[in-house]
Image (cartoon, rainbow, N blue to C red):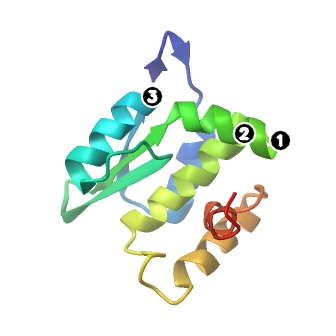
Amino acid sequence: MIFCEEEIDISFLEKIATNMSCADVELVFVDKTMMRRINLEQRKIDKSTDVLSFPLEKNFQNLLGSIVINLDEVKSKAFKFRHSEDEEMALLFIHGMLHLLGYDHEVDQGEMREKEKEWIDFFNLPQSLIVRTQKGE
């Protein structure tokens, strides 16, 4: 995939996807302006965010849903937390995949956090998105 004339290697994200589900996932990369627009249109929240996921109610030809990742946030958070952009993208992708698989940290009793931790440990990634959010980072 090409974004701003910059090629993005998604091979690690493909590995994560195949380990988490046998279904296909649409992956879209955007900047903060487009993410803000999508968030406003889809969730009525007028601000940018790092990742959004849109599960399909009916699995269409083995498609689980869509994950939208904000590359401006990837760069910013990778710098802030001193890890690579690939690691940050992987954290966001895992978070989005879990939402596509039916997890919701806003209403569950910690199940998504635990599942996210399992996948992050499995792929040897830095601290989870949910943990960072709970710490206010």
Marks 3 and 1 sit apart, C-alpha to C-alpha, by 21 Å
Q: Are marks 1 and 2 in contact (CB under 8 Å)?
A: yes
Disc 3 secondary structure class: loop
Q: Quadrant of residue 11?
A: top right
Q: Is residue 44 visible?
A: yes
Which residue: 83% across, 41% down?
A: 82
- Amino acid type indicated by mark 1: Arg
* Amino acid type shown at disc 2: Ala
Kindly identify which residue carries mark 2.
78
Question: Few, some or many C-alpha atoms within 10 Å of disc 3 (few <14, some 14-19, many ≥20)?
Answer: some
**Residue that extends furthest to the top in the rendered view of this protein:** 5
- Above or below: residue 134 compared with residue 86: below
Residue 14 position within the rendered picture, expressed as x and y whole percent measured from the top left: 53, 45
Q: Position of residue 52 (x, y in %)?
A: 40, 51
Residue identified by numbered label 3: 31
**Residue 47 percent coordinates (x, y):** 39, 44
Whether 88 is drawn above or below 104: the answer is above
Upstream in sequence: badge 2 or badge 3 = 3
Alpha carbon separation for disc pair 1 and 2: 6 Å
- The residue shown at (55%, 31%) is 72
- Pick the residue in front: 42 or 17: 42
| Alpha carbon distance from label 2 to label 3 | 15 Å
Q: Nearer the viewer, residue 67 or 15?
A: 67
Observer able to see residue 30 = no
